[in-house]
Image: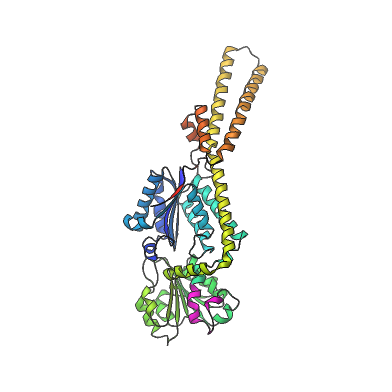
Amino acid sequence: MSVLAIGVSHRSAPVEVLESVALDRAAVGKLLDEVPSSDQIAEAVVVATCNRLELYLDTATFHGGVEEASTLLSLHTGAPIELLTPYLYVHYGDRAVSHLFHVVSGLDSMVVGETQILGQVRDAFRLAQTSGATGRVLTELFQNALRVGKRAHAETGIDAAGRSLVTLGLARVLPAVAAEGWSSGQVGGASWRELLSGTSALVVGAGSMAALAAATLQREGVDVLVANRTPENGARLAEAVGGRAVAMAELPAVLRTVDVVVSCTGAAGVVLAYDLVEAAVSRRGGRPLGIVDLALPRDVDAGVADLPGVVLADLARLSVAADDDVADARTMADDVSAVRSIVTDEVAAFATARRAAQVAPTVVALRSMADDVVDAELTRMAGRLPDLDERTRAEVARTVRRVVDKLLHQPTVRVKELAAQPDGASYEAALRELFALDRRSIDAVAKPDPVGHDAVGHDAEGTVQA
């Protein structure tokens, strides 16, 4: 078994493609439900966010895993294979591990260094566990990945240098609606609260992204209103930020009064239609309206950007803005470099541990075979020397076992040490051949278990374009 990562993200596909493959929590659950019946996939975790859809799998073979994963993506997103193929990326073995570590550390995010992805990966892992789609391999991988992500943010300033999509989106629209003289260069500065005093914002949605937006706005002194299709969830979020919940039916009236709208629902279609926004704008008396659309698929009709006084920041626009910010943010270079070093070291340590673990079932099988040989010989001795007293019989048994243990000690220690090297698999194979170990007995020891650490290592590694 080996780890395979296959997916599509803002780095490989335009927003229009990402919209077509977006999966909500229920859809992810349905995909995970198919894992137990798969011939190629033993375990799976699906990371589905506003700008990526990735499958992390424990597969029997590389090509079979890619084929089955591609089929699952097409089936559950409704996107034809022909549409997906040009944008899919595939990582295998150690490369898949490296990719995941980069993702959780914020290095692969649209806004480098943002911390939200760490929570999203944690939630994806928990959902896969709840669905019964994970076992030893991915449990070990994701536990290590989450630890690496935490370490990256704890030991560097990557999260301070990078900004979340919420903050980036607000930075794009607030200059149009905040006090005169305010500029995007003041994002996160001490002047935010003063300049945003008296402004109001509507947050549409009540998920993690909506909660982040509401908390960010509330922290800067903005009056927050929350609208959600499930009123109870909207009321809960509004209460948490000291805001006020409004019904979705009130949107036409609310849009006429607020200064900013942040929409991030899981709806399949447009929530803020062109006609709805146009009608509200016509009754605002020329006051500008900033709209941040962080949903995938989009919540806001892209055409509203052409309405007078409307400033729209959606994922397509934020992608360009994020690239510009990163290019200009020279102060981030040291932190990014530090995180990359952490990831490189952690990937190497993980790979070394996995290679060392690969030989463990073979060592256990060898010890078991030796025990069987000793037991058989002691039984044979008992038959040939029936008059041997019990004390002598016990001493002979102890002596034979000590001899066998000493003979096997150095080879098993050395094979574990050698197996940790990049070509370690050959040493494990040599041990099997030298002692004629039964492959079935080794496989029985290495049988996956939902809890603990997998003893089976990875095959060849690589990265390919699907």
Main SS type for the magenta part? helix
Expressed as whole percent of the image width and height from the top left, the position of residue 291 reads 44, 76
Nearest to the observer: residue 207 or residue 352 = 352
Q: Where does the N terminus fall, quadrant-wise?
A: top left
Using the image as rendered, state which of residue 78 and residue 312 is in the foreground: 312
> Measured along the vertical axis of the image, is residue 57 above or below residue 257?
above
Residue 176 lies in the magenta stretch: yes
Residue at x 54%, y 58% (from the top left corner): 105
Tell me if residue 16 can be seen: yes
x then y, percent, for residue 205 = 45, 69
In the picture, measured across the screen, residue 16 lies left or right of residue 452, that is left
- Of all residues, the one furthest to the bottom in this rendering is 285
Query: Image check: 126 left or right of 268?
Result: right
Residue 145 part of the magenta-drawn span: no
- Magenta-highlighted residues: 169-186
Query: Number of marks in the image?
Result: 0
